[in-house]
Image (cartoon, rainbow, N blue to C red):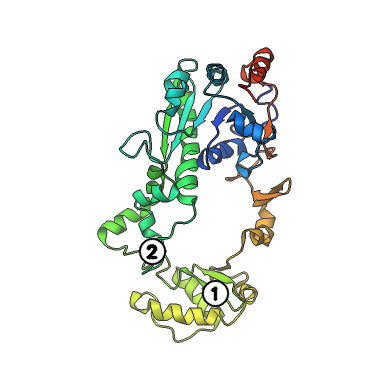
Amino acid sequence: MSAATEGRTGPLAGIRVLELAGLAPGPFAGMMLADHGAEVLRIDRVPAVRRAGGRPRTDVMDRGKHTIGLDLKSPDGVAAFKELARGADVVIEVFRPGVAERLGIGPEDLHAVNERLIYGRMTGWGQDGPLGPTAGHDIDYIAISGVLSMLGRAGEKPTPPINILGDFAGGGLMLAYGVLLALIERGRTGLGRVIDAAMVDGSALLFAMFYQGVQSGSWGPRGTNLLDTGAPMYDTYETADGGYVAVGSLEPQFWEEMVARMGLTGLPDRDDPANWPALKERLAAEFRSRTRAEWEAVFDGSDACVSPVLSMGEAAEHPHNKARGTFLRVGEVLQPAPAPRLLGVPEQDLSPATTLEDLSGWGLSRETAAKLREAGVLA
């Protein structure tokens, strides 16, 4: 095992990833791979490293990684990147279509030096199509995919769920999944693969279960359906102290458990959507009669599927999450633990990103690195 991979454990131990600096989805994919043992070397821009005084980024998504600064607009920087890619397994690239090719580090450039390399491309619109060259953000990608039209309450405008759907679920997670597929394929063929991970594609895929319902008419406008706050048995309700509880009592037996514990009687048929507005009003009034903590006590240990809506800080202190170690602290930063869990695999070192001084394990000699540093190409 080389110095570059020493100390890593897990199913991806020995896999080397070059992650080109970029916004959320690229680093998230790199984090997912690093969390399970991959050696991830983040390539930052030299000016960014200098502004930080040589200190690596401490974002949660940079945990467990190494970092360097490299000037990819310099021929020497490009040559150095190719040397790093020669011994790498994966490259994560986050530029607009055509930028990597203009820099001389596109898939063909790197496959010329390493045919086993998996080249993961992360964009919003994808590598082709009329929107490919244009700018966008998560909200744009989920809008074009049709997903945003389905999110929000009845009679209100569409509500984006921050940038979880496009950037992270439809983007970074899909890219990490694509990398794993390509690694499996490479085990059979010995050859790398280019992955075109587009957030518009990924967000559309995440809503696969709803397409048949929309086309058949069984799934109506946003905010009027079983799972989108239309139904009384799947919504949030305010409590007396300004907190909230989440109700997910979809099945009849869970609904019966809930209303029994709440002491409610004489309710109309919940399976008739015409009764939903009246039921929601009745539940809302009842939930406002007690505090969130009081309702927690009422439903403790039950199958009513009623849970407190916790803040991110409260979530880390919940007994279930503490028992499972769902959250942890790296330094002073509270953050979610790696997922999914692979039982029997030792925990990874999730320390904040560290600067990698010695690149010889990645194929760049100390002499070459020293010259690049002196020339300002490597930071």
Q: Is residue 335 left or right of residue 18?
A: right
- Residue at x 66%, y 52% (from the top left corner): 327
Which residue type carries mark 1?
A: Glu
**Secondary structure of residue under mark 1:** strand
Q: Which residue has dot 1 on it?
A: 238
- Residue at x 69%, y 15% (from the top left corner): 366
Residue 362, image x and y in percent?
Answer: 62, 20
Q: Is residue 226 above or below residue 192?
A: below
Rendered-image quadrant of the C terminus: top right
Q: Nearer the viewer, residue 81 or 99?
A: 99
Of mark 2 and mark 1, the one earlier in the sequence is 2
Q: Is residue 20 left or right of residue 136?
A: right
Which quadrant of the view contains residue 310? bottom right
Residue 16, image x and y in percent?
Answer: 58, 27
Q: Which residue has dot 2 on it?
A: 157
Q: Is residue 288 left or right of residue 124?
A: right
